[in-house]
Image: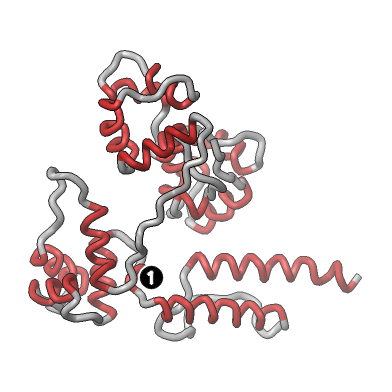
């Protein structure tokens, strides 16, 4: 299984930036503060099944904090759902987790009737779960690339289709979305008809306050609704500031005074870390 990369020093840095103690993190993940300390100093590695909860309490995406190089197999999907193998018996309705264990070890493939319950528990499609199973048996199964949504209408539709799967999770109505956006803004900024026009592509753009409300409603980053050129400008701005820092024109960078888009926290953290590293190496170079 392609293990996720765990950097204890980064865990410590992100935890401190979030103003959390080791005890806070331990309670959220279900371990002692001593265990968290061991993760941070590199003495021990957290269970793969603990990584989703750890990323969540630290306010990071799983793939961002603990990247994986390679495509997931069955064990990876289970761990990414925060589930231990012993918990899967209850999911598939058996007394033992042996069917899952056998499939993860490449011994025997899952009975077809177990595929959908596991896919639902893991938060993936049946197709993705079956592809991961084949990787557990040593087969190289490439990931199918879906069309990336680019327009505002495509992005809204994508979230509606992928965030509310199944008959028991009906997508919210245009009225419900509009009400949520207005509540987030604290004012009447869009109507049910306005949401419908955005969703169907009749209207192709929206005001920043509406985009922020949509992002809050769907629980995604506001960056998701930004056009590609806006994202490119942020990348350029980050690189320009990094260049200025290297030339000694700026020491630390904050999010103020950088234009309407500003810089994402992740970019600020990355640039500031590089600046710190450059400052530490400078005396050595001049010695």
Residue 194 location, quadrant: bottom left
Q: Is residue 277 above or below residue 103?
A: below
Residue 247 location, quadrant: bottom right
- Its colouring scheme is secondary structure
Which residue is disc 1 drawn over? 223
The answer to which of 284 and 237 lies nearer the viewer is 237
- The reply, left or right, for residue 81 in relation to residue 200 is right
Name the quarter where the N terminus is drawn: top right
The answer to which of 7 and 279 lies nearer the viewer is 7
- The reply, left or right, for residue 281 in relation to residue 183 is right
Question: Residue 91: in sight, yes or no?
Answer: no
Percent across and percent down for residue 29 are 43, 38
Q: Is residue 171 above or below residue 42?
A: below
Q: Is residue 96 above or below residue 113?
A: above
The residue positioned 36% from the left and 77% from the top of the image is 227
The answer to which of 260 and 143 lies nearer the viewer is 143
Percent across and percent down for residue 266 are 50, 65
The residue positioned 37% from the left and 36% from the top of the image is 130
Other-residue count near label 1 (Cα within 10 Å), few / some / many at <14 / 14–19 / ≥20: some
Q: Which residue lies furthest to the top in this view?
A: 95
Name the quarter where the C terminus is drawn: bottom right
Count all numbered tags in the image, as a single digit.
1
Q: What element carries label 1?
A: helix
- The reply, left or right, for residue 212 in relation to residue 193 is right
The answer to which of 214 and 250 lies nearer the viewer is 214
The residue positioned 42% from the left and 80% from the top of the image is 230
Percent across and percent down for residue 261 are 41, 80
Percent across and percent down for residue 154 are 26, 68
């Amino acid at each position: 299984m392609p293990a996720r990369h765990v950097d204890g020093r980064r865990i410590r840095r992100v935890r401190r930036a979030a103003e959390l103690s080791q005890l806070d993190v331990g309670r959220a993940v279900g371990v002692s503060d001593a265990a968290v300390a061991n993760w941070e100093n590199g003495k021990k590695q957290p269970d793969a099944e603990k990584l989703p909860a750890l990323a969540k309490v630290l306010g990071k995406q799983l793939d961002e904090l603990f990247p994986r190089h390679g495509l997931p197999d069955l064990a990876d999907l289970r761990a990414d759902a925060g589930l231990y193998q012993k918990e899967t018996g209850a999911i598939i309705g058996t007394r033992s987790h042996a069917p899952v264990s056998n499939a993860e070890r490449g011994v025997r493939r899952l009975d077809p009737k177990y595929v959908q319950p596991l896919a639902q528990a893991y938060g993936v499609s049946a197709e993705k779960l079956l592809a991961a199973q084949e990787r557990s048996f040593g087969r190289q199964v490439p990931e199918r690339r879906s069309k990336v949504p680019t327009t505002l209408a495509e992005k809204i539709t994508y979230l509606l289709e992928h965030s509310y799967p199944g008959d028991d999770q009906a997508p919210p109505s245009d009225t419900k979305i509009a009400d949520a956006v207005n509540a987030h803004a604290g004012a009447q900024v869009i109507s049910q008809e306005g949401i419908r026009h955005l969703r169907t592509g009749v209207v192709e753009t929206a005001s920043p306050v509406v985009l922020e409300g949509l992002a809050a409603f769907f629980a995604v980053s506001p960056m998701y609704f930004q056009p590609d050129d806006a994202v490119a400008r942020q990348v350029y701005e980050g690189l320009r500031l990094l260049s200025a820092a290297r030339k000694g024109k700026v020491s630390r960078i904050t999010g103020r005074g950088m234009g309407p888009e500003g810089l994402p926290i992740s970019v600020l953290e990355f640039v500031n870390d590089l600046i710190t590293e450059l400052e530490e190496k400078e005396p050595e170079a001049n010695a």
